Image (spheres, rainbow, N blue to C red):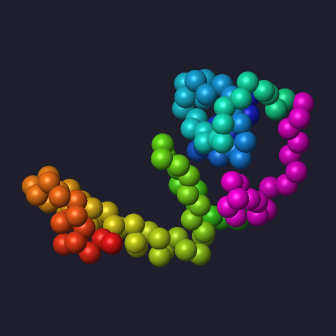
Amino acid sequence: MMATTAKVRGLAGMVIDGGARDIEELEEIGFPIWSRSQTPATSVGRYVPVARDVPVACGGVAVRPGDWIVADQTGVVVVPRASLPQVLKLLRQYDEKETKMIPLIKETKSMGKALQIFNRY
């Protein structure tokens, strides 16, 4: 129910510093969720909103209003709002290098050579 509510309110996904349930149903409605674990327990009757747009800690990481949350199957990363331009610049540089490295690795069968040539240490 919480995920459906979040989705209809326009949220793109949810990161939970705890357990989540009904994972298959969340996939069916197209609502991605990242959690520490899976649980059969419900939060109905125990969920109490406290505040919004305030700094929090999730998994020991500080998250502030305006920060960017980037998540995929590998995990979740918090990008502080003030660091976003610098992070995007670095990501473009890494992506450009890695795009060029893949053919070299296939050709030479050596990741070490590619790392050395592209100075990726």
Left or right: 14 in relation to 73: right
Query: For the magenta stretch, what is the residue range?
Result: 45-62
Residue depicted at x 27% and y 62%: 98
Image quadrant in which you'd find residue 5:
top right
- Whole-percent x, y for residue 60 in the image: 70, 59
Residue depicted at x 48% and y 74%: 85
The quarter in which the N terminus is drawn is: top right
Q: Can residue 103 be seen in this view?
A: no
- Whole-percent x, y for residue 38 in the image: 66, 31
Left or right: 19 in relation to 24: right
Image quadrant in which you'd find residue 104:
bottom left
Q: Nearer the viewer, residue 89 or 75?
A: 75
Image quadrant in which you'd find residue 31:
top right
Q: Nearer the viewer, residue 108 or 43?
A: 108
Q: In this view, does 11 lie above or below 88?
A: above
Q: Main secondary structure of the magenta part?
A: loop
Residue depicted at x 40% and y 73%: 89
- Verify whether residue 32 appears in magenta: no
The quarter in which the C terminus is drawn is: bottom left
- Whole-percent x, y for residue 22 in the image: 66, 25
Left or right: 96 in relation to 71: left
Q: Is residue 116 above or below residue 72?
A: below
- Verify whether residue 60 appears in magenta: yes
Residue depicted at x 60% and y 39%: 33
* Extreme-left residue of the structure: 107
The mark tally for this picture is 0
